[in-house]
Image (cartoon, helix red, strand yellow):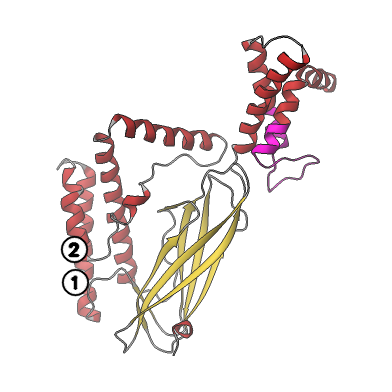
Amino acid sequence: MKNSEHIAVNLTTQDYIAGSQEYAVALNITNASGKEISDLQVFNTLSAGREISLNNGLESSNLNALEDKKRRLIRDLERAVESAYARKRRKKQSLSEQLAFTLVEAVDVYASIFSKRKSQPTTPYWAEEALKIDEWEDVEKLEKEVISFEDEDSFLAKAYAINKEKLERVMSKLEKEQSKVFSKGVSLPQGSTISFPFSFKAPHLLKQKKMDLSFKISYRVEGEDVVHTRSSSTRIFIYPSAFSVPTGGMVGAAVGYAIKSTLMSGEGLALNWGILVGSLALGLVISLLASRKPETNKAITVEDFTGGLIIGVLAGLYSEVILTKLQTLI
């Protein structure tokens, strides 16, 4: 039987995805091999944004209770390692690293102002794979290389030790029941379906963009020693971040103010901070009013940085006219 006939894969994503926001992806796998599948694992090989650790519980009516507990314990251990690594990294950062980290955090905080989610610290992409647990030796090594730098009395170190002990007991029970070695994978009875949910944080975007998602699936079929692999990919459409339009509006308002103060007046740029701040505020308000939202319908909408920029320039150029019209309406 071909690899493609062992399992049926259905990759689904949420309908509306915006930059800087969290979005969900689910990989539904059905065992069509006629035999039990073991050591089933799904790896994210190409993501649109950063993978985050929320909503990572498996959904399957046939998932063994011990297997489910094993996966949750492994993920808890990985979270503890990520947290300890982040603390250790912050303590040893050079000045340039601190500046770069502060800049990244500042962008995340700025983006969170216009979204419903708070900014979250993330692990560098080049360290993510190193902090994952794929076998029991990883549990021991990460404890030695990362967790050991935590204070002995810290809750993080104690929680890691407790979860490690729990995982050891679960693995011991699994080995007695199923005669299996350590594995992050799960077993899937014939005809059963299991869902692997993933959560990502989309990148910061100033305009719409198409991006690809790709996953690798590995598994074993009962009675075979071969590890089978299969990939599944999809292309998603990501809308601009919520901050793109208001940012464009404020930049455009500043440009409009500069044009009005120079070209239209025929004099050099005379910087009036009060008028400039007023123009920026007006550009922000108008761009927010005109920004596109999936749940509302408006006569005039803009949805990216360029649209906000144009709206902002007009607000900066004709601020007095706009204010007069608003006063008339009020």
Q: Quadrant of residue 278?
A: top right
Residue 307 colored in magenta in the image: yes
- Specify which label sits upstream in the sequence, 2 or 1: 2
Q: Is residue 234 left or right of residue 267?
A: left
Height in image: 248 above or below 156?
above
Residue at position x 27%, y 40% from top? Answer: 89
Q: For the residue labelled by badge 1, is the local secondary structure a helix, a strand or a loop? A: helix
Q: Position of residue 67 (x, y in %)?
A: 32, 71
Q: Can residue 13 be seen in this view?
A: no
**What span is colored magenta in the figure?**
285-310
Instruction: Give neighbour class at mark 1: few <14, some 14-19, many 20+ (Cα, 10 Å).
Output: some
Front one among 90 and 253? 253
Image quadrant occupied by the C terminus: top right
Q: Label 2 sits on what residue type?
A: Glu
As drawn, the label of residue 137 is 2
Q: Position of residue 124 (x, y in %)?
A: 36, 46
Residue at position x 47%, y 37% from top? Answer: 108
Residue 108 colored in magenta in the image: no
Q: In which quarter of the image is residue 184?
A: bottom left
Q: Label 1 sits on what residue type?
A: Ser
As drawn, the label of residue 172 is 1
Total marks shown come to: 2
**Mark 2 or 1, which is nearer the eye?**
2
Q: Where is residue 172 in the image (x, y as percent from the top left)?
A: 19, 72
Q: Is residue 330 left or right of residue 84?
A: right
Height in image: 285 above or below 319?
below
- The reply to whether callout 2 and callout 1 are in contact (CB within 8 Å) is no
Q: Is residue 225 left or right of residue 290?
A: left
